Image (spheres, rainbow, N blue to C red):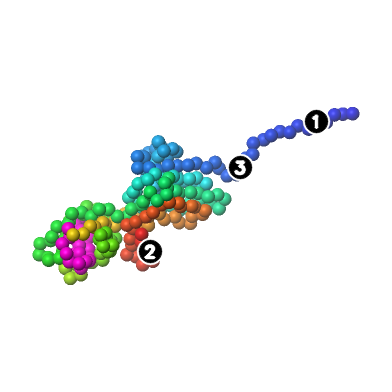
Amino acid sequence: FAKYYAFLFLLPCLSPLAAATEYFVNKHGDDANSGRGRDAAFATIQKGVDALSPGDTLTIGPGEYYETVMRENLGSADQETVIRAEIPGTVLLRGDIPAPQFQKVDGYQFVYGADFDEDGQTQAVYETDTLTILRSRPDIASLEFNPGSFFHDREAKRLYISTPDLNPVDQHHYRVSVTEADEPRVHGLELRNARRVVVDGLAATGFYSRTPGYLSA
């Protein structure tokens, strides 16, 4: 009788999903790096988010990151894509910067001004010690009669404020929310048309918009 032998060939299982990659961002990084390791980390969260493919993970080291981050069409329905803080609660996206040193403006009783060489749009001025948001006004004269206001003269590169309680400006602490000049963004992290994206352990503050329908943080 003829003998029949069965041969079993073990072939590697080919998954339709690409292998996931973990990218890193930290305060010692450089956007010229590959991002594939703590020692080769990116410097900005935007660079890290741009590098992600579906299923990848972005791990962000502790620190304050002065940037707005936006990505369209991130992720897929097949697998989770993760953006996470390496240590939850230690990553802060900031949309504000320290205010300049204000001085009394000649000819006004309640108006203070400072040089402010920022190319972006000033969305808000925060009086951080009282958790007050100063309101925007169209000119310097308006500040004298509207306590708790600001005016940014972009052409002259000057920022003017009046304090809410009319006390001297050095009795308070201020920060300024500035968005990018070319494409104003008012979110810490904006993901448009995202699919199965998990964001874990990040916080945002200092982002503000005077446009109706936008949330601030």
Q: Which residue is mark 3?
A: 15
Q: Is residue 124 above or below residue 8?
A: below
Q: Residue furthest left?
A: 107
Q: Is residue 43 above or below residue 150?
A: above
- Where residue 63 appears, x then y in whole percent? 35, 46
The residue shown at (20%, 62%) is 161
Q: Which mark is residue 46?
A: none
Q: From this viewpoint, is residue 7 visible? A: yes
Q: Which residues are magenta?
A: 147-170
* Residue sitting nearer the eye, 175 or 193: 175
> Which secondary structure, mark 1?
loop
The residue shown at (16%, 64%) is 167
Q: Which residue is mark 2?
A: 214
Q: Quadrant of residue 184?
A: bottom left
Q: Amino acid at mark 1?
A: Tyr
Q: Quadrant of residue 35?
A: top left
